[in-house]
Image (spheres, helix red, strand yellow):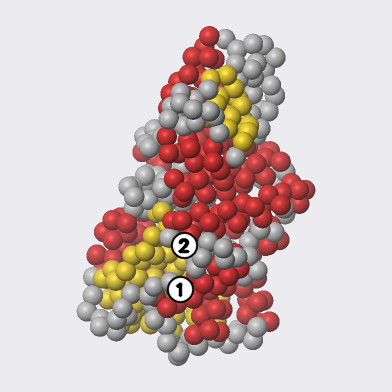
Amino acid sequence: MRATSAAGQTFSADVVSSPSTWFDRWALGLIRRRIAAAPVQFVLWDGFALGPEIGPPIGTFVIKNRPALVGWLWDPDLYFGEAFMFGAIEVRGDFVGVLEAAFRAVRSTKPRPWWLWQGSNDEQAARENVHHHYDLGNDFYRLWLDREMVYTCAYFPTPEATLEEAQIAKMDLVCRKVGLRPGEQVVEAGCGWGALALFMARRYGVTVRAFNLSTEQIAYARDRAKREDLDGRVEFIDDDYRNLTGKYDVFMSVGMLEHVGKADYPTLGSVIDRSLRANGRGLLHFIGRDQPAPLNPWIRKRIFPGGYAPALREVAELVFEPKGLSVLDVENLRLHYAKTLEHWLQRFTDASEQVRHDFDDAFVRAWHLYLAGSEASFLSGWMQLFQIVFARGGSNAIPWTRVIG
């Protein structure tokens, strides 16, 4: 494993020894005003505090120095994460609850520069982006994912279901939504550690070609397929989705669209179109939004470079409509992703000392913020989780009724 944080340090955790000035207190007032409806308290390095306008606080933001204060004031979407990551800002109280309250209080963010909206994730960029996030090491992800190593939203039949049960339920749900039948050929774009591809072959009797750019994940998936005697029915391919060839009955993509980038949606649509047989159908499972917006710049910088979470209409207009593909069903599993993240965050917290040993403290804080902030984003409605079932417009070989639960 490798430490990835220190070289890019932007803030210090050092506490200012001098008292806060009128400018510091004025700046803190502006920050509080942006989330005035949130029941949270703000405290500067010298103890100066501003409480919530209404009711008692549920938590406290502690700002340790002036650079962290000015950074938050100047660009909260980027510099709050940076300052927290390097210990210049602390959050006291229920971390997820405090972040959720802040997200609910701020219903719009500062307009982002034009360059965050554009750009294509070509094959080289896509491989580098995947390497940045997914090739941190299988041992790292094994610390806090489920036994199947599924790194996408689970489906909880009941809120009390375990993460292991919910991930298996999710895999079964997407298979039933596309109506998998024995003997069919499936292509999967972005297969992670291979759990879904192996599940489809084992449980539904299909053959699968699964594409992925993560060296670590592909090696793990191939080894697992061999151990489970499924390597004759599942082929894991270390390649970009754009190089996909052949004709298939089903196109499956769970958790990859977020990495495609809006500029390349038409390309994805063309790949789906040329891959599906006349009666083909498919499913896209992805993080999205109610309205178009670029990915949070701190998440983009530290966690998911090149990422984009689209609004539904962007997917329809750029992926489906140009190729005459019909949307059969749309389901939003937002609260299921919040519950998934609750499990991941707890497991990550339990393993934090091991993660700190393998990486560094800034890495632990960054991933703690990423997981907690993501849970808060889904709880507050900032982010959505969509599953879209689609088929060729003229095909009648589609499910007769909607799959429920």
Query: Type of residue at label 2?
Result: Met
Toward the viewer: 79 or 46?
46
Mark 2, residue position? 256
Q: CA distance from mark 1 to mark 2?
A: 18 Å
Within 10 Å of disc 1 (Cα), the crowding (few <14, some 14-19, many 20+) is some
Mark 1, residue position? 173
Query: Type of residue at label 1?
Result: Leu
Relative to 132, 254 lies left or right: left
Toward the viewer: 97 or 131?
97
Residue 212 in sight here: no
Residue at x 68% of width, y 82% of height: 227
Q: Name the outermost residue toward the top.
A: 22
Element type where label 2 sits in the image? loop
Q: How many marks?
A: 2
Position of 75 relative to 138 (above/below)? above
Residue at x 70% of width, y 14% of height: 17
Residue 80 in the image, given as x and y percentages of width and height: 54, 33
Q: Please tell me whether mark 1 or mark 2 is closer to you in this view.
A: 1
Mark 1 and mark 2 lie on one chain; the one further toward the N terminus is: 1
Residue 277 in the image, given as x and y percentages of width and height: 33, 82
Residue 116 in sight here: yes
